[in-house]
Amino acid sequence: MKQILTLMMAFGLTACGAFNGRDDAQFDARYKHPISVDPQVVTLQMEVPQDKIALSASDKAALDSFAVTYKARGHGVLTIAAPSGSPNEAAAVSLVAETRAALRDAGLPEPAIGYAAYRASSANANAPIILTYRRFVASASPCGNWTEDYAFAPNNGRTPNYGCSTQSNLAAMVAEPADLIGPRDWDPAYAPRRDEVIENFRIGEVTESQESGSASGSVSEVSDD
């Protein structure tokens, strides 16, 4: 009887190993349900009547909002494109400088702002100034594969939907989809602080920042009463 039980246990372990092998151990939902990260062009259009000589308050508000989204998720240059060949070409070109100034006031550095011209219809008297920039958008693979009988799984294997909801949630919640492509570049070193630390080390002084009066390393005590 003891030998029979031993054989049954060995068979059970062998069967378990056969169904849960190397492929199952190395499973990663990123490969079964990948998240695609694709570039998307974001556009803002501002109509320019022929008699327009300055940006309106609503134009400036739209530019400010556009700059905020660019700083949060924009990549590359934010391009200002003015119409060419339309009746309002001169009015549009005259507003480009004010548009650039409004973007700089919103916090964009000059190298981040570009300029281009596009061919507009000669019949379009209100051809717009078009601002564009590139951002990335994350999209998960679709879930809902019910081709297998989930109530009958004798091998205790993975279902087709395993990990899909997690991947979908990640794609929906990630603040910067470009982070899924690769790590961000390092910010440049802050030279004044670096030089100060090196000098303090050279003369034998403390190199770390001084603690403020509000800093405390004490641990709070909770009474058992």
Image: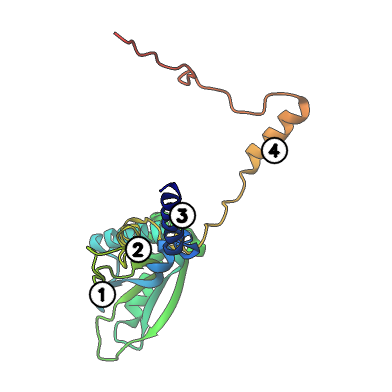
Proximity of marks 1 and 4: CB atoms separated by less than 8 Å = no
Compared to 44, does 165 lie above or below?
Answer: above
Total count of labels: 4
Residue at coordinates 25% horizontally, 91% vertically from top-left? 123
Name which of mark 1 and mark 4 comes first in the sequence: 1
Name which of mark 3 and mark 4 comes first in the sequence: 3
For the residue pair 161 and 189, the one nearer the viewer reads as: 161
Quadrant showing the C terminus? top left
Residue position marked by numbered label 3 in the rendering: 10
Q: Which mark is residue 195?
A: 4
Disc nearest the viewer among 2 and 1: 2
For the residue pair 70 and 160, the one nearer the viewer reads as: 160
Q: Position of residue 42 (x, y in %)?
A: 34, 70
Distance Cα–Cα, label 2 vs label 4 = 63 Å
| Amino acid bearing label 1 | Glu
Disc nearest the viewer among 2 and 4: 2
- The image quarter containing residue 33 is bottom left
Question: Does dot 4 land on a helix, a strand or a loop?
Answer: helix
Name which of mark 3 and mark 2 comes first in the sequence: 3
Q: Which mark is residue 155?
A: 2
Distance Cα–Cα, label 1 vs label 3 = 78 Å
Proximity of marks 2 and 4: CB atoms separated by less than 8 Å = no
| Amino acid bearing label 2 | Asn
Q: Position of residue 11 (x, y in %)?
A: 43, 58
* Label 4 crowd (10 A; few <14 / some 14-19 / many >=20): few
| Amino acid bearing label 4 | Asp
